[in-house]
Amino acid sequence: MEYANYEALREKILGRGVVVAIDGPSGSGKSTISRNVAAALDLGYLDTGAMYRAAAWGVEHRGVDLNDSAAIAAAVREMKLTVNAVPHAPRIFVDGIDVMHVIRTDHINTIVSSVSSVPEVRTVLIALQRDIIVQARQSTRGIVVEGRDITTVVAPDAQVRILLTASAETRVSRRALEDQGDARSETLDRERALVLDRDARDAKVTSFHTAADGVTTLDSTDLSVSQTLDTVMRLIDQATN
């Protein structure tokens, strides 16, 4: 499928409440591809990783001990977390505060796993994510959802389920360019620790390196963004015949 055919695909799935679920490790391109797919096909967009980051911000903002799992779970249950699922301008709010920009800091990167690895936190946020998906389906608009456990736990019945991956070095380089604007050796070393260490911590409670039955693996190591996007569009086209 060429880029020029995106409009035809958009018309094809219009009003069908299509759900596209994209899972994968850090730096694989989930967010970039998911936002582009959602924008091109006029679907909603949900970054579930941002929800965990927002929860981490909210927990720390409340002064909760990040080594106290019970206190973390209680704080997440109490906080009001809302999402604006618009691909061109996604927003996430914690108790009415827009935290979309502050949750992308290195500091949040280092603490998010302390929150996301708490089982009770995952239970609360997965329930919220499922509610958002149900609302998108009922509105018939549809949605692209990306993040950990999306293809297996959160939306196992999505019409399109993709595990987007890439080599470790490719993922580190991409994240360095995204976060720091360059891929010099010192930047790569810093990002390598952030990306791979977080994957190692998250892998203790989620599975995102191997595709489950019915999930298509897409390795983007040697693909450009446009090539990866075209491949995802083909998969959506095939799955919605």
Image (cartoon, helix red, strand yellow):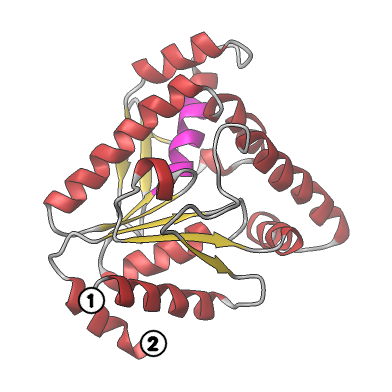
Looking at the rendering, the stretch of residues picked out in magenta corresponds to 47-58
Left or right: residue 205 compared with residue 92: right
Q: Earlier in the sequence, mark 1 or mark 2?
A: 2
Residue holding disc 1:
241
Q: Is residue 128 visible?
A: yes
Q: Residue at x 69, y 39 (%)?
A: 200
Element assignment for label 1: loop
Direction right: furthest residue: 185
Q: Nearer the viewer, residue 85 or 10?
A: 10
Mark 2, other Cα within 10 Å: few <14 / some 14–19 / many ≥20: some
Q: Residue at x 56, y 32 (%)?
A: 205
Image quadrant containing the C terminus: bottom left
Write down the quadrant of residue 108 in the picture: top right
Mark 1, other Cα within 10 Å: few <14 / some 14–19 / many ≥20: few
Say which mark, if any, is on residue 168: none
* Mark toward the viewer: 1 or 2: 1
In reply to whether residue 16 is colored magenta, the answer given is no
In reply to whether residue 54 is colored magenta, the answer given is yes
Residue holding disc 2:
1
Q: Residue at x 31, y 87 (%)?
A: 5
Kindly report the secondary structure that dominates the magenta region of the rendered protein: helix
User: Looking at the picture, which amino acid does disc 1 mark?
Assistant: Asn
Percent across and percent down for residue 236 are 33, 71
Write down the quadrant of residue 9 in the picture: bottom left
